[in-house]
Image (cartoon, grey):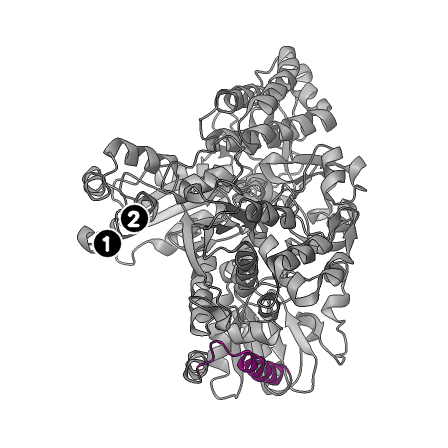
Amino acid sequence: MNHRIHRYTLINYCGDFMNFKQIVHQEKKDYNKLLSDKTAIMVGSATCGNSAGAQIVKEVFEAELSEVECEIIEVGCIGLCYAEPIVLILKPHQPGVFYGNVNKKRARKIAQSHIIQDTPLPELALGTWGLGEIKGLSPIFEQKPLKMQERRILRNCGFIDPTNIGHYLAQDGYSGFVKTLQMQSSEIIQEMKKAGVRGRGGAGFPTWMKWQLCLDSKQETNYLICNADEGDPGAFMNRSLLESDPHSVLEGILIASKTIGAEKAYIYCRAEYPLALERLKIAINQMKSLGFLGENILGSGFNLEIEIKEGAGAFVCGEETGLLASIEGERGTPRTRPPFPTTEGLFGKPTVINNVETMASVALIMQQGADKYSKVGKGESKGTKTFSLVGQVKNTGLIEVPLGITLKEVIFDIGGGLIDNGEFKAVQIGGPSGGCVPSQHLDTPIDYSSLLDIGAMMGSGGMVVMDQGTCMVEVARYFLEFIQKESCGKCVPCRLGTKQMLDILTDITIGKGTEKDLDLLPDLAEAIKIGSLCGLGQSAPNPILTTMRFFSNEYQAHIEEDVCLARDCTEYIKYVIDPELCDGCMACLKSCPLEAISGSKDEVHSIDLLKCVKCGTCLDLCKKKKNAVLLMNKS
Amino acid sequence: MADLNIILSNYEGKKSDLIPLLQEIQSEFGYISEELMQQVSRFTGVPESEIYGVATFYTQFRFTPKGKKHISVCTGTACHVTGAKQIIEGIERYLNIKEGETTKNGEYSLESVGCLGCCSLAPAAMVNDEIKSKLSLRIINKLFKEYEPSDS
């Protein structure tokens, strides 16, 4: 790629629209060649793919195919995390084939059989892609996990090299930005209004209005900040997008900055996302080489500089004013609003703060038009939304669905239901600010208002599925523990209130809860909701309120009957060995980290309850053998 | 040993430089010592107390050296429901240290961190910069064996 950028720079591409068209034309030709005339191996190597072994798989292909003419490309994540590492094989005049769960051995087999001998391996494949048929395989986008999705924001993820700006240009990348160069700010805002795009960070504030408010403050210097401080536990949509298609976000940043007249934009990204940061840096350098950044961009007179700020690990910095304080070099404590950042933001100047997915949506709207964007969605919730679908669900991964789809469709059709045929209990949506939705509300459509009606919220897009083995009191305690740790300590209701709520919940989960606690919790929750300074505190009670509303029986069981219905809270449970089933194989005895199991070969074993830390290793081990280890309530 | 002056020369000493500066110092020196903090204070003109206030606010900053292998166990929601707590306890038992501590020989340190963003591979942990996925108590022992120096 480097040679190409060099070539463009030499022909002095800056400021010439004809050249832009020529370059796009050439890139499209090259990309199509890659898809149809060459043998290409696309290895999904975002963080999820890499940690499942994608780099090793790539090395195997490189070694096996050193004599074969082909291109091995690292691409982003197609979102089917349960099947990582995923490899897409493209051969001329054949449909592409996706292989899942590729390991060293399979990679060798695929290289030898599919690539060298031209015999695809349907038994190892997930499905086909593109025109044509292969016996025994169906097109991957016709299969349930992908069929019900509407991939727009994620359209390029898994199909382009995120470190190659040419691949993005070949997908009409930056054409949206080029359009805006001939538009007035008011026209761009009008287009956003028509599209009906709302902030994807969670609150759902109309994007056009934020931009308008910033323009209305009529000051000379404005700033744009892209919020990539994705701190919600259970959410990784932004990481995946930044790793798989960073230019789509950067194009959105260009468009937004142009609209509000910002000459400096910041990307505030978590330091815990090293790969996303690396790919962003590469992408920004490529933009500079092509003249999409810097002074007088494409001869339009518009200047922009983008700076990456690494977040230092504080959840509250996802809150707008906390984020501003952090960039200014302060403790990231939020402040009262108004003044809102759109009038008084970074360094006191009007500032628009938009989420990563919002930026990618903006680029998409300018590329394809507002009408196309707003065609999907429901009521006031237009477009699509990405979610990370995780927990006890079969098909974990990153998904993108049209707003208005029901939770049931997402969990059971796209997600494929629960693992080990478990029974659904709840889905946690919206992170620590959201709530747990039980099975009777699974028909709720996913849109901004319907979720609020049942006490949850859209949030940034984390969706954690839980089965009957998850204790809802413990889940609420977990979120409170998180919030309490992350509370910045500035305002009293949040600092002390969340601590009190956490103490009460901890008491309940360790068998010290009382009847009074169940009255005290809602009172405290209400006070914290009303009295807290920022969104973190105001929404902190949500996990408690929704679990108390839908799972009050579990709270009562802990307190009144001294049992944990889910058999999850360690204080309430014990592991015992069923003497009828145990055949004395010694496996659990050897694996117990605390040597709490006694017995000898071919004799029934027993667990010393005083030594046992209830880690569950023995149960996991015996499940597949004799199933002699039982998990039961203490009382 | 890294040279603080070379790091400082990349910055103007503005207040907004403070966090990136501390980040760079930590990545070079491994942690932020009292002495380094004093020098940053002289460079930026921000009082030491305030720098300490800022640094302790963010979980990224450390004030003690970490082990050669730094283990960060993810405690995001997905990891929590799949047993992150057991994983931490298991590692604590194995290394005979508590979360936040470093082993006496300086080989390992352990901490729990917020969501690492690989929820579909839960429970997960990061060892230095490498993600280890789908952990279980049984594979922890295996994991540590992998790290044992071959001569011991």
Residue A606 appearing in the image: no
Look at mark 1 in the image and give the residue it sits on. B7
The reply to whether the magenta stretch includes residue A32 is yes
Q: Main secondary structure of the magenta part?
A: helix
Residue B27 place in picture, x, y as percent = 30, 51
Look at 78% across and 58% down and name the residue there: A375
Q: Is disc 1 placed on a helix, strand or loop?
A: helix
Look at mark 2 in the image and give the residue it sits on. B21
Look at 54% across and 59% down and name the residue there: A258
In the displayed structure image, the side of residue B2 where residue A624 appears, left or right:
right
What's the magenta region?
A: A12-35
Residue nearest the observer in this picture, A630 or A484? A484
> Quick one: label 2, few (<14), some, or many (20+) residues within 10 Å?
some
Q: Is disc 2 placed on a helix, strand or loop?
A: helix
Residue type pointed to by label 2:
Leu
Residue B7 place in picture, x, y as percent = 23, 54
Residue A488 place in picture, x, y as percent = 45, 30
Residue A514 place in picture, x, y as percent = 62, 12
Residue type pointed to by label 1:
Ile
Label 1 is found on which chain of the structure? Answer: B
Look at 35% across and 54% down and name the residue there: B147
Q: Give the CA separation, mark 1 to mark 2.
A: 8 Å
Above or below for A327 versus A100: above
